[in-house]
Image: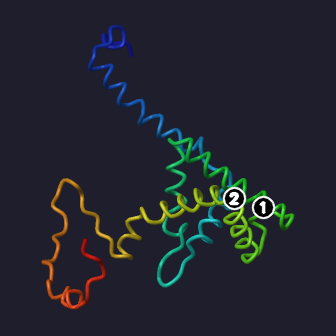
Amino acid sequence: MITSETVNPSRRGFLKTGVAAPVLVSAIQPAAQALPQQTQTTLKTVMDLIIPAGDGMPSASEAGGMRYLENLMQPNKDVASDLQQGLDVVEAFSQRSFNRPFADLEKNDQIAVLKQIESTAAGVFDRLRAYVYESYYTQPAIWKRIGYELYPTDHMGPHMKPFDDSLLANVRKMPKLYKDV
């Protein structure tokens, strides 16, 4: 349908279109940018080895870490590159040490591969571990389990308890640990 706005667009029409375009593109992007199944399997395994389930806490992937990282990679190609590099190194070390893909290894062998990477390719491992930690500790479900409370910056935060001066009594009884000059 041709209207006067499509022939002679107004500033308001331009702004409406400009606001709608990123929403449309972001709705289309995730399907086109999905990780291949083998990459997802390797990433999930690495995540769960770095943060396994235990003591009533979920593993990294159970907490929603995979979804978080996939969403993080969509708009940020540096994150996608870092994660892909880390997973490529995992596969390369697995092939070099065991002549098999990482996903096909026994758990102890997978741990051995990650330990090798940590000691010989520390930068790659550090980035991979940092993304896994971020994917885990940014989950509201994990916040509740560890007792973290989010205080938005537009509201008053928690109030500190009044300082108990009696806590310093033993320190005040100690002799000086410095020399007067």
Q: Does the residue at mark 1 contact the one at mark 2 (Cβ under 8 Å)?
A: yes
Question: Looking at the image, how many numbered discs can be counted on the residues?
Answer: 2
Height in image: 37 above or below 108? above
Residue depicted at 36% across the width and 13% down the height = 6
Q: Position of residue 139 (x, y in %)?
A: 42, 64
Foreground label between 1 and 2: 2
Residue annotated with mark 2: 121
Q: Relative to the observer, which residue lies in front, 167 or 2? A: 167
Q: Quadrant of residue 150?
A: bottom left
Read off the residue under disc 1: 93
Of residues 57 and 34, the one nearer the viewer is 57
User: Could you say which quadrant of the image residue 40 lies in?
Assistant: bottom right
Marker disc for residue 134? none
Percent x, y of residue 126? 59, 60
Q: Quadrant of the N terminus?
A: top left
What colouring method underlies this structural image? rainbow
- Which amino acid does the dot numbered 2 rest on? Ala
Mark 1: which amino acid? Phe
Along the line of sight, the residue nearer the viewer: 94 or 101? 94
